[in-house]
């Protein structure tokens, strides 16, 4: 099934969330032994303090202490919205230390119609006192090796995870990515993954960040988990919103919120 028919399978949790694919399911008990994983490992507490889990089954990152950057396809539109709960501050979603804050407003990317422009902002009822994730405003960091993280499915068709998982994926050029996805919006999307597959984001990771270190050795967000053909399949990289393309629009939208 080609991707122009599979955009409905964007890595949102409408049908089941998004996180690192091709990883063995994590145990539901913290006392159980962690099984070997393929393609990813558990993140340490505090390793990625900007990571946010959203109650509709998507991921996100703290753009400011009161605004979460996520994917447009994770939300239904713009306006007042108090139905979303953001969970932050933990890698274990069942931890008693989890910070939970309700949404107040949502701003979906203007002009979003299911293709490209896959970003959205969620304003929270109160600030979360955790580090934020800077976004790339130039294409200087749209290359190299990226880190992805999330609580989504650890295998194609799998369920959501209790623990935050992480993995690294290499940049894939637009020309190579278009061989898998002719409908790729090259000016708005960036691809990453291994030709042989095995490591990827998956259902339930949508909206989460793809990031790397900048020249000051600080994390910087270059992508937002958007879509892909299945999870971790050979020759089908993950497709991410190219944050640098929309940095100015995101900054303006955040100011309006």
Image (tube, rainbow, N blue to C red):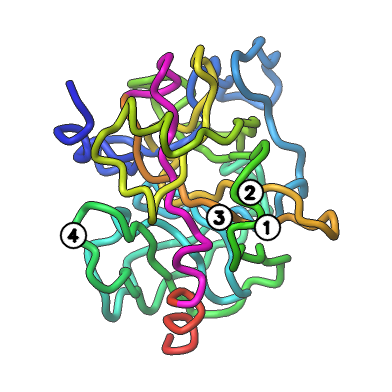
At 46% across and 84% down in the image, what residue appears? 252
User: Which of the 4 image quarters holds residue 235?
Assistant: top left
228 or 9, which lies in front? 228
What residue range appears in magenta?
230-248
Horizontal arrangement in the rendering, residue 235 relative to residue 214 (left or right)? left
103 or 116, which lies in front? 116
User: Which of the 4 image quarters holds residue 129?
Assistant: bottom right
Q: Magenta includes 232? A: yes
Q: Residues within 10 Å of mark 4 (few under 14, many from 20)?
A: few
- Report which residue position mark 1 lands on: 220
User: Which of the 4 image quarters holds residue 15?
Assistant: top left
- Report which residue position mark 2 lands on: 211
**Looking at the rendering, in which quadrant would you find the C terminus?**
bottom left
N-terminal label among 1 and 3: 3
Q: How many marks?
A: 4
Image marks 1 and 3: residues in contact by CB distance under 8 Å: no
- Report which residue position mark 4 lands on: 113
| The furthest residue to the front | 175
53 or 114, which lies in front? 114
Q: Is residue 173 above or below residue 28?
A: below
Q: Residues within 10 Å of mark 2 (few under 14, many from 20)?
A: many
Q: Residues within 10 Å of mark 3 (few under 14, many from 20)?
A: many
**Cα–Cα span, label 4 and label 3:** 25 Å
Q: Magenta includes 245? A: yes
**Cα–Cα span, label 2 and label 4:** 25 Å
**Looking at the rendering, in which quadrant would you find the N terminus?**
top left
Q: Residues within 10 Å of mark 1 (few under 14, many from 20)?
A: many
The circle on residue 52 is: 3
């Amino acid at each position: 099934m080609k991707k122009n028919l599979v955009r409905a399978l964007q890595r949102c949790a409408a049908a089941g969330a998004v996180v690192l694919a091709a990883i063995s399911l994590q145990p539901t008990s913290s006392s159980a032994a962690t099984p070997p994983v393929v393609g990813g490992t558990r993140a340490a507490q505090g390793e990625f303090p900007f990571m946010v889990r959203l109650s509709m089954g998507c991921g996100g990152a703290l753009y400011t202490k009161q605004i979460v950057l996520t994917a447009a396809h994770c939300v239904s539109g713009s306006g007042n919205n108090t139905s979303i709960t953001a969970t932050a501050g933990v890698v274990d979603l069942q931890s008693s230390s989890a910070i939970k804050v309700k949404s107040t407003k949502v701003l979906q990317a203007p002009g979003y119609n299911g293709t490209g422009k896959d970003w959205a902002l969620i304003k929270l009822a109160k600030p979360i006192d955790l580090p934020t994730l800077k976004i790339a405003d130039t294409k200087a960091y749209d290359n190299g090796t990226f880190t992805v993280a999330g609580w989504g499915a650890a295998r194609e068709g799998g369920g959501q995870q209790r623990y935050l998982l992480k993995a690294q994926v290499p940049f894939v050029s637009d020309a190579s990515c278009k061989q898998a996805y002719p409908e790729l919006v090259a000016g708005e999307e960036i691809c990453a993954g291994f030709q042989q597959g095995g490591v990827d984001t998956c259902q339930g990771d949508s909206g989460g960040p793809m990031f790397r270190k900048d020249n000051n050795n600080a994390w910087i967000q270059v992508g937002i988990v958007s879509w892909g053909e299945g999870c971790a399949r050979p020759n089908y990289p993950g497709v991410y919103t190219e944050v640098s393309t929309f940095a100015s629009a995101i900054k303006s939208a955040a100011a309006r919120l």
